Image (tube, grey):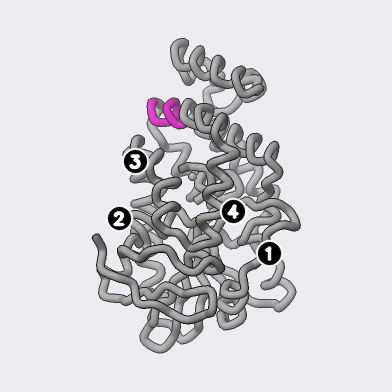
Amino acid sequence: MSFALQCRASVVAALALLFLGAGTARADAPPMWEVAGTTNHVVLLGSIHFLKPGRDALPPAVVEAYRRADVVVMEIDLDDLDPLLAQSTLQRLGIDPRGRTLEQLLGPGDHARASARAREIGIDLGLLDGLEPWLAAITVSQMELARLGYDANSGIERQLLDLARRDRKEVRGLETIEQQLSIMDRLPAATQSAFLLESLDEAATLPGQVDRIVAAWKQGDTRALETEFLDGLKSQPDLYRRIVVNRNLDWARKLEVLLRDRQDYLVVVGALHLVGPDSLITMLARAGHAPRQVTGTGARTTAGMPH
């Protein structure tokens, strides 16, 4: 996901979906699986896009997976991302082309509810009045993460990108920023309104939620990650289908191509995409592959059957 959509995936419940019945891994093992290709190996790492600066270094198992990979693949090719293009794309898609305000897009009832909830958490919704509801929702989450000290520049992708640039290792993307943001921009009006209202509701409990997500990620606790990420999304089936299921289907097809290559790959996507019944891990298993969860020592454990 992009810097904006990453945030939501991590917070959703968005930044951001195995479930092959695997339990909790070692305490030093993030959610990571290895899949054997025809002549190569592909490692899938579930990422946390936002972390606190200077506090969370890459776990040894992740560093080892990076070292073994010939190519690093992320949701977006951050190595070649043009910040000006990204910003212009965000503005083009996130601002209503007809010039309608957030209040007009939400309607009187939802806007009143959103304003009241925003005031409760110390946010002036008027500052977001030029944004479409989906971008306002993401912005709220970003603001709250920043308030808690979390930063995308300290996230897993950014740390791996720094290593790849140092080592001159190739970085690729599964999709473009245009594709990512268009998913949100095409959400129906009612879904966008619900998205914003839920984001404002979650802001009040965000500190505890983010701490739980980071702790579960460090432990490779896929059951906890599934609960934190998917419980909120499942109440919005259209949003879940668009940002999880459809993208996982597309990515699974692209991973099939990588699994026929000769190079070894480290594929890094939001942990949201590696948990739950519609995860990339489940899709690969159903396609006949045998993903094995990587433990903190670098050993592998064979995943169980989908439940």
Judged left or right of residue 23, residue 103 is right
Q: Earlier in the sequence, mark 2 or mark 1?
A: 1
Pointer 4 or 2: first along the chain: 4
Residue occupying the far bottom of the picture: 39
Picture coordinates of residue 140 (x, y %)? 59, 32
The answer to the question of whether label 1 and label 4 lie on touching residues, with beta carbons closer than 8 A, is no
Q: Which mark is residue 234?
A: 3
Above or below residue 132? Residue 33 is below
Vertical order, 246 against 66 (above or below)? above
Q: Look at the image and tell me whether residue 170 can be seen.
A: no
Relative to 162, 198 lies left or right: left
The amino acid at mark 4 is His
- Magenta span main SS: helix
Residue for point 34% across, 59% down: 249
Q: Nearer the viewer, mark 1 or mark 4?
A: 1
Secondary structure type for disc 3 = helix
The earlier-in-sequence mark between 1 and 4 is: 4
Residue where numbered disc 1 is placed: 57
Amino acid bearing label 3 = Lys
The residue that appears at 49% across and 69% down in the rendered structure is 26
Give 256 or 109, whichever is nearer the viewer.
Answer: 109
At 57% from the left edge and 74% from the top edge, which residue is drawn? 61
